[in-house]
Image (cartoon, grey):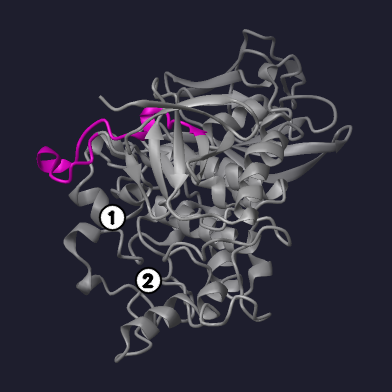
Amino acid sequence: MAKIVTCETLDGQTIQFVDEVIGSGAMKEVHFSPDRSYVVAFYKTRQDYQAKERLQMIAGKYRESIFNQIGGDYWQNLFCWPTAVLEHEGRLGLVAPTYPRHFFFEHGSKNNDMLGIKGKEKEGKWFAAANLRNRFVDPRELGDWLNHLKVCLLLARAVRRMHMAGLAHSDLSYKNVLVDPSQGLACVIDVDGLVVPGKYPPDVVGTPDFIAPEVVATAHLPKDDPNRKLPRRETDLHALAVLIYMYLLYRHPLRGAKVHDLDDEQRDEQLSMGERALFVEHPSDRSNRIKVARAKPTELPWADTERLPYTLTGPYLSQLFEQSFISGLHEPSQRPSANDWETALVKTVDLIQLCLNPVCEQKWYVFDNSTKPRCPFCGTPFQGKLPVLNLYSSRKEGQFRPDNHRLMVWTGQSLFHWHANNLIAPNEKLAEAHQQRVGYFVLHERRWWLVNERLPDLMEVATRTPIPIGGKLELKDGQQILLAKGEGGRLVVVQMVEA
């Protein structure tokens, strides 16, 4: 039986840990508390005064600035944030909550868990590469495409919150993010190395595949060289864009076929990820396209960018991928913010449509109204009559402007407060009263209906017919429906798509 050690944290809390290492990484060794509700991690090497001070700030002031604000509870599930710092037998350590159970593999890998991953953490890499997904991961763990969008949304939100607090993660990668695509959940871990610009420099340059090109290109320079680029907010934004691209398209945006140095593999890697980094789907420079003929069978169809281009993610995300990997790849100031990603992902979730093929692996896709709508993943065409709601919001009483936001309708699709008023945002500050749906859509005898559950102002505009709570309204092409009055109140224009 391993013994239980009792000690005190630097801020005077009594904690206990089991004297048995349950996990060991490059920097730390981890122990469980006796009841397994938290872990205690000790650094393997001696840490200097600055490292200790930074840890105390992360577990103290920075933690409070995020968790003790309005909506603070929301972040408990999105970050595994250190709660205290301790010193024991000359080693510096930290206390952090245990990861929730859904972030551990419930089912082993394929072929009787030949990789032994059952019970291990769901590191993001298993879900971000087609080869690993197809070869090893149990289909019950993979989730569908809508859940992958939700994972990306939570990630963007977590990064936005860190940046708002003046912090940068510095090593954002699929190693430091746990995901559960079967439920659409994500959690940012390893936040003990947070960078505070001008105060606490980064400990690491990042994880290969996610390091921004400017950091790779200047990595050979001494740390104090003014031309050396180190991890900061803008490098997080590169890593976030790569993560989102990989979670939705299961391939890397910069790893194509182009070779920069035939004789020196290390230099070739440095150039392709750094100074000469090039988007594999660059519209005018095709020299770094992925060679489909060389792809492993388990990487297909995802390695085929002609068949599954980034544009299948819809108009809002496509624009941000272009900004990240074309205009912003070598211009850090041009990169979309975490808030831009969050907004685009919310709008994309509203464009999603259920695939009519019951065995489609991805199950959902972004509805493309510009061509004949079909699922890009399995090729199944959409059939039937479908309402698309174009949202307009009021700036002044009676004047409505387009919001560049549309809501796809499907049976059981919900309407929420943030659809009815553009001043309400579906984020951590969403009041409890605004979390319930206000209406839903149903197809009955080939006619589409909106059922009003909580919209006191709902009205069919042309006939000025109010729709009482509990009542329903049939949707028709060209129809205008007022969802809510007053500032930010929304009007929808119905467009009927027939396929």
**If you read the primary sequence from the N terminus, does the residue marked by circle 1 or circle 2 appear first?**
1
In this rendered view, identify the residue nearer to me: 337 or 192. 192
Which residue, as the protein is rendered here, is positioned at the far right? 396
Q: Is residue 351 above or below residue 234?
A: above
Residue type marked 2: Arg
- Nearer to the camera, 351 or 383: 351
- Give x and y (percent) for residue 487: 85, 31
Instruction: Indicate left or right for 30 with 171 as reference.
Output: left
Judge by depth and name the residue closer to the eye, 99 or 128.
99
Helix, strand or loop under label 2: loop
**Residue 151: in magenta span:** no
Q: Is residue 496 above or below residue 135?
A: above
Give residue 255's mark: 2
The residue depicted at 61 percent of the width and 29 percent of the height is 74
Q: Quadrant of residue 289?
A: bottom left
Magenta region includes residue 100: yes
The quadrant of the picture occupied by the N terminus is top left
Count how many numbered circles sit on residues in the image: 2
Q: Main secondary structure of the magenta part?
A: loop
Residue 421 in which image quadrant: top right
Q: Cα distance, mark 1 to mark 2?
A: 14 Å
> In x, y percent, where is residue 124?
38, 47
Give the magenta range: 96-118
Q: Residue at x 62, y 10 (%)?
A: 471
Q: Which residue reaches farthest top?
A: 470
Secondary structure beneath dot 1 equals: helix
Q: Which amino acid type is shown beneath numbered disc 1?
A: Ala
Q: Residue furthest front?
A: 89
Say which mark, if any, is on residue 130: 1
